Image (spheres, rainbow, N blue to C red):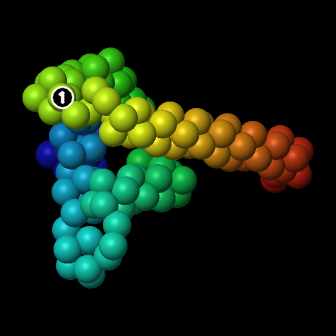
Amino acid sequence: MSSRTVIAYATHVLRHSAPLQVGVVIGFWLAGEGIVRLFGLPLPGGIVGLVIVLALLASRRIKTRSMRRGAQWLLADMLLFFVPAVLAVLDHQELLGLTGLKILAVILVSTVSVMIATAFTVDRCYRWRADHAGSAPH
């Protein structure tokens, strides 16, 4: 088997396997953690890993098809990631009082802020892409 055939087969398997794609996402997260620890960056490793994924997607070294199934699988089961947090609230009754309201306010304000920033960014990118679509060489 040639190396090109092996790469084509691996790409085909990756595109059709959600667990493998989740493994790739975890791999990028671990790579981000390694970079943060190696360089002593004051950032979470997950953020650095996502920046790596974004750069690879933007440069088209990774196609979205290679990550789509895994991302959809993670998003579909996202509620399971919050179960431990709910159980922690039950163990800490003080979160049901004023402290909990303050935390809830911070969560709501930060969530709305992220949604607004994301909407603004997507709008700007869409407008930029629409403005430059006519001037792109064919």
Horizontal side, residue 68 vs residue 117: left or right: left
| Residue found at the very far left of the displayed protein | 91
Q: Secondary structure at mark 1?
A: helix
Horizontal side, residue 134 vs residue 74: left or right: right
* Along the viewing direction, whichever of 10 and 70 lies nearer the viewer: 70
Mark 1 is surrounded, within 10 Å at the Cα level, by few (under 14), some (14 to 19) or many (20 or more) other residues, namely few
Residue 93 position in % (x across, y down): 18, 28
Q: In the rendered view, tell whether residue 138 sits above or below residue 83.
A: below
Q: Is residue 9 visible?
A: no
Identified at 30% across, 61% down, the residue is 44
* Along the viewing direction, whichever of 38 and 12 lies nearer the viewer: 38
Q: In the rendered view, tell whether residue 29 sits above or below residue 85.
A: below
Residue 101 position in % (x across, y down): 40, 33
Identified at 33% across, 39% down, the residue is 99
Q: In the rendered view, tell whether residue 50 sits above or below residue 17.
A: below
Identified at 21% across, 46% down, the residue is 26
Residue 40 location, quadrant: bottom left
| Residue found at the very far bottom of the displayed protein | 39
Residue under numbered circle 1: 93
Q: Is residue 77 visible?
A: yes
Residue 63 position in % (x across, y down): 44, 42
The amino acid sitting under disc 1 is Gln
